Amino acid sequence: MGGYSSEYQISLKSGNVVYQFLDKAKYSGYRIHILKEKWVYVNDNDQEFPIDKNDFSVTVEEAKITFDVVFNAIHGTPGEDGLMQAYFELLGIPQSSCDYYQAALTFNKRDLLSVLKPYGIKTAASYYLNLGDTIDQDAILKAVGLPCFVKPNKSGSSFGITKVKTKDELLYAIANAYKEDDELIIESFLDGTEVSVGVINYQGTITVLPITEIVSENDFFDYEAKYLGKSQEITPARISEEMTKKVMAVAKKVYETLKMTGFSRSEYIIVNDEPYLLEVNTIPGLTTESLIPQQAKEAGISLTDLFTNALELAVNK
């Protein structure tokens, strides 16, 4: 838990929820904080013991501890972009999230949407910028129109995203997004119903969880809406049975097309009875208020069962 992104505190919350609800009869849990300045095991008294990065072990009272399986609860880099996945693969330690390629691909919004488009997955009109590129405001607005969203391309969080309503706001929004990333994606505004869909492999079967409808008090589902209660999250979503089936089919197709494993949560806007994909998260929030736990509860899956399933699948991958 932890990570190097602006969202590390949410990850610590997610990790502590996983630790709290682990099946103690099956697992001995260890909280490992992966932070820029240190990698440490934190015991129940909040004492810290450094992790040996050579083999991902820790020495406590002269006893060396190694781990059978890792539950990855890091949002953003290095846990959601493939770095930790590749590290654990090299060490031969199973981990609960998708593989490194899928993590890197989904973390890069531009690459993800480019890969899925040929499979018929609908997305918003977009325009790409890299740091140092000439900013042609007229070309951007011709491509995406107003209002539009300016987003960091590689970011597991909601930081750096701006909804732009007038041309005057565009340069500020671009500068704001560059604080988080050196690549940007600018997308047209889709006016419709926003939904979030969890897909997991549950007991060997790819399972689409009940859909959540997002009604944000803010202009969009930003950090405040996501984590500070500035949104209504309605599970199951108030959409027709036919639309529910359609969204679930698209979410399952995305999961299968990408050859995903572990957790995934994809976001869609429904416009004119068509779901448009916004993004795919591979390490979604796992706090008790987060969407995947809400959806699992609606499906009759307890947090303990959800986490046990993830670890058992990882060990048997």
Image: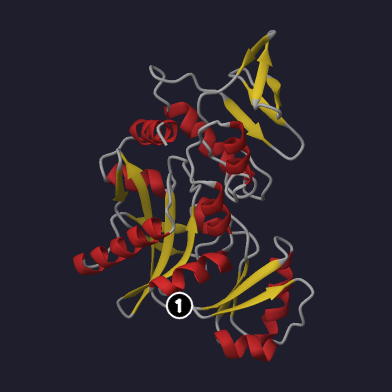
Camera-nearest residue between 162 and 188: 188
259 relative to 12, above or below: below
Residue position marked by numbered label 1 in the rendering: 190
155 relative to 310, above or below: below
Measuring from the top left, give residue 77's x and y in whole percent.
64, 48
In which quadrant of the rendered image does the N terminus lie?
top right
Measuring from the top left, give residue 295's x and y in whole percent.
33, 48
Residue 212 appears in view: no
> Mark 1 packing: few (<14 Cα in 10 Å), some, or many (20+)?
some
Measuring from the top left, give residue 245's x and y in whole percent.
24, 64
Measuring 55% from the left and 31% from the top, which residue is drawn there?
93
171 relative to 37, above or below: below
In the shown orientation, is residue 73 left or right of residue 275?
A: right
Outermost residue, top side: 62
Camera-nearest residue between 137 and 125: 125
Measuring 41% from the left and 64% from the top, which residue is drawn there?
215
The residue under label 1 is which amino acid type? Leu
Measuring from the top left, give residue 257's x and y in whole percent.
40, 60
82 relative to 2, above or below: below
Residue 237 appears in view: yes
In the shown orientation, is residue 206 left or right of residue 115?
A: left
Camera-nearest residue between 211 and 80: 80
In which quadrant of the rendered image does the C terminus lie?
top left
Which quadrant holds residue 155? bottom right
In the shown orientation, is residue 134 left or right of residue 111?
A: right
**Helix or strand or loop: what does disc 1 sit on?**
loop
Outermost residue, right side: 132
